[in-house]
Amino acid sequence: MRHNHSFWLLAVLLISFLLPERADAQTCTARHANGKFVPVRERTGMSMFWAHASYDPDGWPSITYGPTFFQLPQIMQELTVLHECAHLVEQTTNEFIANCKALSIMRHQGLSSAEEEYIGQFHIQIGPLPPQYGGSGAAFWAGTLQMCHGH
């Protein structure tokens, strides 16, 4: 589902602070299966990735943070939270769209060029990734920047 620019800005404004163990942790508000906006449930648990977005059986949007999430540098945790939120807000499984939205929000919040370079280098050093990420961390980052071009 595609949303216009003002919808995305509204979604960004709905981002709130929630995770107490990280004072700057950001979470989001997304559509419940009933169509109403609700705060996303956040929890730790098993995830094949750093984290994943899904919908609980009751239709509630949720983000599950796997053990490796908590080993990431803080800036990568921030990107990951926004990435998973973007999956729910945009209602997309496209990893490049989610990463671009996360990067765009961080840029809007004042991400420095040095911080963006760090994020890019972090992606590149990941190595092989599943096909939905382009096959490698380098391809994932390149695809993210291509998706964000002009945004």
Image: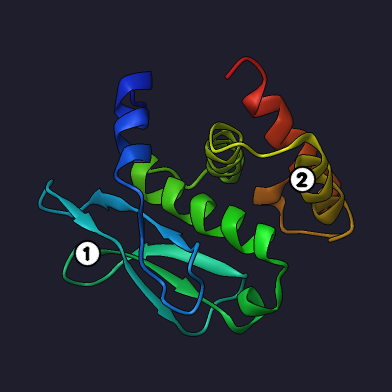
- Which one is in front, 113 or 9? 113
- Label 1: few (<14), some (14–19) or many (≥20) C-alpha neighbours in 10 Å: some
Can see residue 136? no
Residue 74 position, x and y percent, is 66, 65
Q: Quadrant of residue 103?
A: top right
Q: Quadrant of residue 75?
A: bottom right
Determine which residue is flagged by label 1: 60
Q: Amino acid at mark 1?
A: Trp
Q: Is residue 16 left or right of residue 78?
A: left
Q: Is residue 16 left or right of residue 53?
A: left
Residue 65 position, x and y percent, is 51, 75
Residue 34's place in the image compared with 92, above or below, is below
Residue 4's place in the image compared with 119, above or below, is above
N-terminal of the pair, mark 2 or mark 1, is 1
Furthest-top residue in this view: 150
Determine which residue is flagged by label 2: 115
- Which one is in front, 57 or 60? 60
Q: Amino acid at mark 2?
A: Glu
The residue under the point 45% across, 73% down is 64
Q: Secondary structure at mark 1?
A: loop
Dots 2, 1 in contact, CB < 8 A: no
Residue 80 position, x and y percent, is 58, 58
